[in-house]
Amino acid sequence: MEGVSNNSNIYEIVLHGFPNLQRFHVLLFAILLIIYLLIISGNVVILLVIHRETALHSPMYFFIGVLSCLEIFYTAGTIPKMLANLLDDERKMSFNGCLVQAYFLHAFGAAECYILTIMAYDRYLAICKPLRYSSIMTSGKSANLVVICIIGGMLSPVIETILISLLTFCGSNHIENVFCDFPPLISLACTNTRLYIMVEFTVSSFIILLTSAFIIFSYIRILFIILRIKSKDGRQKAFSTCGAHLTVVIMFFGSIGFMYIRVTKSYSVDYDRAVGLTYVVFTPLANPIIYGLRNQEIKRFIYKHLLMKQFFMFSSKRLQ
């Protein structure tokens, strides 16, 4: 069998992608490429604005910048290969490359869970403890929290990656998805995988449930404080500082929750593809839009830089 060695270990993985839409592969490639460029450019713009504007050098925007960096790396591990497979009829990938892609998918995904949790904690301090906020959330503490989140994200899928690398694989080397992930790889093994499925489910559930519970707890406390604010403008301002973050949290945790925390594994292949695309493609696309268009400070500085650029271009043409 192609892709299987004499000792029954798989060396190559075939990603099926969207077999029913293969005749539209050029159109799908163009759409996905445009989305990927929008993700990269949108997050880069946010990073540049935060870096250039000293008024945005605060913990909240520092965390937004870190989230933008994570989105760039997160999508770089999956979308380029998805683009290549749309133009490649064989859609092959080495087993080690597939395992590495799954590792980084989970590592950056876990790091994003942790960063979103820290951002909820930051909003809790800013709204519930405003007088102590600057002394608690210092620049040094913000940097330390980010380092802990990234290291935690890199370590989170290590056990799963090691266990899967020790499995014996045989039979089919086809994955009914558009990218590599731990559950499809485990399903290719020819040995009893109950322990591996349990470990993968436990690790994913622990990360998702623990971080989401902390975020929910933070927003319950925030809501109680906001409801005590007597002025309408004060309540609107408090809600606006949390709106963008809460929208991203619902989209990201909702999609990964549907994917990795399941009562049953008997969902259709199309379901897995749709949910997978949501948190790998569409959620990263929504993040720069949400933070760029809903965040008044970032939007104001973007407009300012665009207007200044247009002004200087117009002035240089007049002088010529």
Image (cartoon, helix red, strand yellow):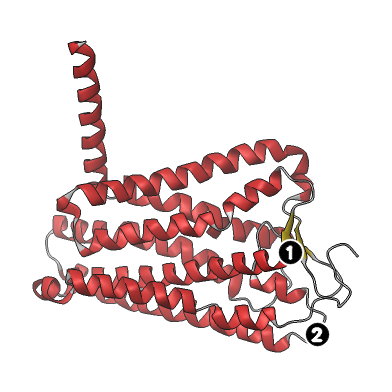
| Residue 206 spot, x, y in % from top left | 50, 83
Q: Quadrant of the N terminus?
A: bottom right
* Residue 178 showing in the rendered view: yes
Q: Quadrant of the C terminus?
A: top left
Dot 1: what SS?
loop
| Residue 200 spot, x, y in % from top left | 61, 81
Question: Residue 110, which numbered label?
Answer: none
Identity of the residue drawn at 85% across and 71% down? 5
Identity of the residue drawn at 24% across and 14% down? 317
| Residue 195 spot, x, y in % from top left | 69, 89
Dot 2: what SS?
loop
* Residue 223 showing in the rendered view: no
* Outermost residue, front side: 6
Q: Residue 267: which quarter of the image? A: bottom right
Q: Earlier in the sequence, mark 2 or mark 1?
A: 2
Mark 2 residue type? Thr
Mark 1 residue type? Ser
Q: Residue 22: which quarter of the image? A: top right
* Outermost residue, left side: 131
Q: Which residue is mark 2?
A: 191
Identity of the residue drawn at 43% across and 81% down? 210
Q: How many residues crowd mark 1 within 10 Å: few (<14), some (14–19), many (20+)?
A: few
Q: How many residues crowd mark 2 within 10 Å: few (<14), some (14–19), many (20+)?
A: few
Which is more foreground, mark 2 or mark 1?
A: 2
* Outermost residue, bottom side: 195
Q: Which residue is mark 1?
A: 268
Residue 63, compared with residue 205, is above or below; it is: above
